[in-house]
Image (cartoon, helix red, strand yellow):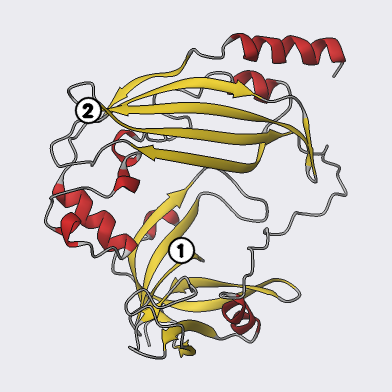
Amino acid sequence: MSNAATNDWLTAVKAQIGREALPPQTAVDPVNLPMIRRWCEAMGDRNPLYAEGKLAPPATLFMWTMSHFRPDLSREGGSLLGLDLVDAAGFTSVVATNVEEEYCRDLRCGDVITQRVTLDGISEEKKTGLGVGHFVTFRYEFTDQKGEVIGRTLFRVLKFRPPAKTAAAKKSPVPRPPVTRDSAFFWEGLNQRKLLVRQCGNCGRLHHPPGPMCPECNSLEWRALECSGRGTIHSFVIVHQPQMPGLNYPLPVALIDLEEGARMVANLGEIAPGKVRIGMPVDVDFVEIEKDFVLPVFRERRAG
């Protein structure tokens, strides 16, 4: 692409800064206790203020006005302003996103949330290990039925130009997750075909994903418990977008209730998206992506 062409599309995007990136979106339903309880159950949040409906978790702010995907994978309400020009310029892939949230007041049952989005900016060209790209930033504002601001979100996405594909190109592997001192035992266990969960050495609570201390008693003492790999599907989503290399889409991803009492997010294997159901019994399988990189994938439990 010539410099002149680059300047043309970039200039066009910059000219739209400050404009509405989407039509205002008002939530179909007010903030309500059943949805709060389901969110808290899935997240393992036992704050009594949420369970009793006195407040809603601040992190649910974005949830109430979230638009849906249509069967053709387009989004209701359209795409964000400016991204069509970025895509048309060849920057079709996403390498990273960043979100900054500001909560202005407590979210309560009965609030009817309206979301407004504006294009906040686009960066000059940046170089990444995957290719050149641009940061595109959007500013979200959430108001209640009285027009009072409840919260704000700054959403930034790095769109990059993927390398040209060749007939001999090797299929990209699944990206490796970050490994920390807290999670290293989990990934090492998978390489040995073991499903390990962190168990508090003081109160015995299981907690996953692993963190530096027990969320129940704040103890730093722990041990690794080997799980059977048997469980049931607590909830699930069918992922269409964004798509990561090395995975097949639509991709069923489930929250699994393990027999031992912990919950784990994992991909489902050999289960058609339309066949997934809550309560389905599943067993873990260990899929080797490449040397020293194994992922847990849960498959439907077979009779017997």
What residue is drawn where x is 38% and y is 81%? 206
Point out which mark residue 271 bears. 1
**189 or 224: nearer the viewer:** 224
Image coordinates for residue 277, horizontal then vertical, percent: 32, 61
Q: To which quarter of the image does residue 287 belong?
A: bottom right
Q: Relative to residue 183, is residue 8 depicted above or below?
A: above
Residue shown at 32% from the left, 77% from the top: 216
Residue 304 vertical placement versus 97 (above, below): below
Q: Residue at x 13, y 37 (%)?
A: 110
Residue that badge 2 annotates: 144
Q: In this view, does 103 lie to the left or right of 113?
A: right
Tell me if I can see residue 279 in this picture.
yes
Give the class, few, some or many, for how many residues have Cα within 10 Å of label 2's Cα (few <14, many ≥20).
Answer: some
Q: What residue type is labelled 1?
A: Ile
> Which residue type carries mark 2?
Asp
Residue 92 pos. (x, y %):
68, 32
The answer to whether 299 is drawn above or below residue 160 in the figure is below
The kind of secondary structure element at disc 1 is loop
